[in-house]
Amino acid sequence: MTKMMIRGGDLDLVEYDFSPFSIGENIRTCGMDERKYSIEPKPGKHTVKVPARVHLCVLDMNRFSPSRPGGGGIGFAIQLYTTAVVECTEKETTIDYSRVPIIRHFVEVIKKVTGYKGGFKICIRDHEREHVGLGSTGAALTAVGNAMSAALGNPLSVEDIRILVGYNYVEETTDGRIIGGFETGVGPAAITYGGMSVMGDELSLVYNSKFAEGRNVYILIPPVTVSAAGESEFNVLMNRARVLDYR
């Protein structure tokens, strides 16, 4: 168990316990498992392509934590894509992707929600720019979630997938387990609907519209060796951002 401290000001000190867990544990179904689904696996490959996103800001750092989706935010989609190709199988699930734990966990989320007992053959290809602020995790989960739903006959809507991604957002650990990540919902919303999204707390989509069509976005990624993942990402997201919010 890892404890991390967040200080935003003289009277603003929060401590979080980060406890990794195994794939398939701590699944949040958001009540969707109580529905009755008609699962009709469709033959063939089902392909879903989704954009990356740029997350501009968190609106309320006091509601931004790894234990729940929240904080709100603003962000927009860009034309840098992640593609998921999914086929149904009788039992076994195989995953062709560099980040197997997060995908395997979301497979278990979809299976628990829908009651599907079979497996999937999954192939994901992304833009290979991870941990630089383009939402690669959210894009992969959103793409594969919608592709799995399509392979099952679309029992879940794109809105269902958006909510499930937000409440089951995880990152992998070095020992093959997973840990709850930080999620405002901006990524899944912008990735799902395109354009610019404004989010409230608990994944509430306040506003979405077309944004800067035909314009270019310049993203500069300097050749630095400082990590922007794991504990380093936490410190940037929580400590520095919270201090700036306090000021």
Image: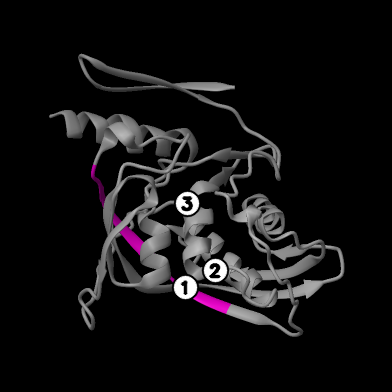
**Contact, mark 1 vs mark 3 (Cβ under 8 Å):** no
Q: Amino acid at mark 2?
A: Ala
Callout 1 secondary element = strand
The C terminus lies in quadrant: top left
Disc 1 marks which residue? 50
Picture quadrant of residue 238: top left
- Is 57 included in the stretch rendered in magenta? yes
Q: Amino acid at mark 3?
A: Gly
Residue lying at 54% horizontally and 23% vertically, measured from the top left: 2
Q: Which mark is residue 143?
A: 2
Badge 2 density bin: few <14, some 14–19, many ≥20, Cα 10 Å: many
Q: Position of residue 70 (x, y in %)?
A: 37, 42
Q: Earlier in the sequence, mark 3 or mark 2?
A: 2
Q: Which mark is residue 166?
A: 3
Q: Is residue 6 visible?
A: yes
Q: Amino acid at mark 1?
A: Val
The N terminus lies in quadrant: top right
Callout 2 secondary element = helix
Magenta residues, start to end: 48-59
Residue lying farthest to the left in this orientation: 247
Q: Earlier in the sequence, mark 1 or mark 3?
A: 1
Spatial CA distance of label 3 from label 2 is: 13 Å
Which callout, 3 or 2, points to the residue nearer the camera?
Answer: 3
- Horizontal side, residue 122 vs residue 212: left or right: right
Q: Position of residue 193 (x, y in %)?
A: 37, 71
Picture quadrant of residue 172: top right
- Is 98 included in the stretch rendered in magenta? no
Q: Earlier in the sequence, mark 2 or mark 1?
A: 1
Q: Is residue 240 above or below residue 226?
A: above
